[in-house]
Image (cartoon, grey):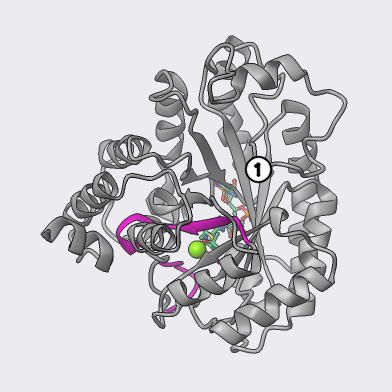
Amino acid sequence: PRPATVRIVEVGPRDGLQNEKNAIPVETKISLVDRLADTGITCIEAGSFVSPKWTPQMANSSRILEHVLRRPPRSATPITYQWLLPNVKGLENMLEIYEPFASEAGYPTPPGTPEHDNGPALNTSSQDPNAIKSAQSGPDAMTPPKTAPTEISLFTAATETFTKKNTNCTIAESLERFKPIMAKAKSLGIPVRAYISVALGCPYEGPDVNPGAVADLAISLLEMGAYEISVADTTGMGTAPSTDRLLKTLSSAGIENRDLALHFHDTYGQALVNSVVSLEHGIRTFDSAVAGLGGCPFSPGATGNVATEDLVHCFHSLGVDTGIDIQKLARVGEWISDEVGRPNESRAGKAVLAK
Ligand code: HMG
Ligand code: MG
C-alpha cells in the first residue's frame, strides 16, 4: 500500500556534516538549517550532543539549538528539530540550552505531538491536549508554538562490533544508557526516536546482519518509549531483496509501518531503489541529506545519505507528496556543497538547476 504522502527527515546538518574534517563555521550550519526550513521540510536533524573527542565537527550544536529555539517559527507549519545524543551527558548538555526556553514558553507541557506519532512515549496521561492543539499546524492551529518543537534521537546498532566502535559499549549497555534519557524526555514531553545502525550490513561483521535481531532491538526500543525507529543502512550495502526481507521480518514481528523510518546511505547507489521498495511496503518516513552530504566517521568508506533532492524527485514522480519545493531545495544543495567544498551529489538537484 503506497502512501499518498511521506514525511522526510532532513539529516544533512547532522549526518551530512559530522564527517567533515575541516571545521565548518557555526554560522554556515545555522544558515543551512534556516535555508532548509524554507523549503517545506518539516523535520530537521540539526546537530548532535556527542563527545567532541569522537565527533569534533558537532561540538557547537548547542549554538544551533539556541538559534532555532530563539527565533520565531518561520512558517505556519512548525518545524521539528531533532538532536542526536548517545548518553545522559549529551542530554544534560542539550537541556542546558533547552530547559530555559521551554520554561519561558510554558513547557514542560509537551511542545506538540508529531502528527505521525502513535508511539507509547507520548500516549501518557500527563499530556495536555490544549498544549498539543496549540502546537499543531494547519488551519485549526489556535496559536503558533512559542518555540520550535524539539525531539531527541538516540542511536544503537544491530551488531556488537559497530556499537563498540561508534559508542564504546555493548548493545545491551546502550539500551541501559537510554533508560534514564527516555524517562527524562518523557517528563519533559520531548519525543524520542531511535536509530538502529548497520541494519542492512556492517563494515566490521559483513553484509549478513540478522533481520530478526533488528526486529528484536526495534521492539525493545519501542517498548522503552521511542515513538519511531529509524532503520539505518549505514554502509549502503542494502539491496532491493535485503530491504524487502528486512521489512517483511519487521512486519512479521508485529512492528507497524507507522513506527518505522528508513535511513539509507548511498554508497552502492542503491538508496533510491531501496527507498521505493520501502515505499511500496507502506513506509511513510524517510531520512535523507540535502546534496547527498555525509557519512558516518565510524563506518569506513560509507558515503552520504540518499540526497533529499533525489528522493523528493522520485517520490513526486510516483505521485507521493513530500510538501517540499524541489527548486528551493536544489539551491540549498548547491550552496552547501560550495560551502563545504564538495561536489553536489544530488543528480536531481543538479538537473533541476541546469534547466
Ligand atoms: P567514551 O569515551 O566511552 O565516554 O565515549 P565516557 O563516558 O568514558 O566519557 C569520556 C569523556 O567524554 C568524559 O570527559 C565525558 O564527560 C565526555 P572527560 O571527563 O574525559 O573530560 N563525554 C561527553 N562529552 C560531550 N557530550 C557527550 C559526552 N559523553 C561523554 N555526550 C560516547 C562514549 C558515547 C560519548 C562516544 O562514543 C560518542 O560520543 N559516540 C558518538 C560517535 C558519533 O558521533 N557517531 C556518529 C553519529 S551515529 C551515526 O552517524 C549513525 C546514524 O546516522 C544512523 C546510521 O546511518 O547508521 C545515526
Ligand atoms: Mg547515517
The quadrant where residue 337 appears:
bottom left
The quadrant where residue 266 appears:
bottom left
Q: Is residue 223 left or right of residue 241?
A: right
Residue 256, horizontal then vertical, whole percent? 77, 59
Q: Is residue 61 above or below residue 86?
A: above
Residue 220, horizontal then vertical, whole percent? 83, 59
The secondary structure making up most of the magenta span is loop
Q: Residue at x 26, y 57 (%)?
A: 22
- Would residue 67 be visible to someone looking at this image? yes
- Confirm whether the magenta stretch covers residue 169: no
Q: Residue at x 64, y 79 (%)?
A: 244
- Confirm whether the magenta stretch covers residue 298: yes
The N terminus - image quarter = bottom right
Q: Secondary structure at mark 1?
A: loop
Q: Is residue 263 left or right of residue 14?
A: right
Q: Is residue 253 left or right of residue 295?
A: right
Q: Pick out the residue farthest to the right.
A: 125
Q: Is residue 155 left or right of residue 71?
A: right
Q: 10 Å neighbourhood of mark 1: few (<14), some, or many (≥20)? A: some
Magenta stretch in the rendered image: 283-300
Q: Is residue 71 above or below residue 274?
A: above
Residue 3, horizontal then vertical, whole percent? 59, 56
Q: Residue at x 74, y 72 (%)?
A: 214
Which amino acid lies under the numbered mark 1 shown in the image of this protein?
His
Residue 189, horizontal then vertical, whole percent? 72, 29
Q: Residue at x 57, y 34 (%)?
A: 94
- Would residue 159 be visible to someone looking at this image? no
The C terminus - image quarter = bottom left
Q: Pick out the residue farthest to the front.
A: 319
Q: Which residue is mark 1?
A: 116
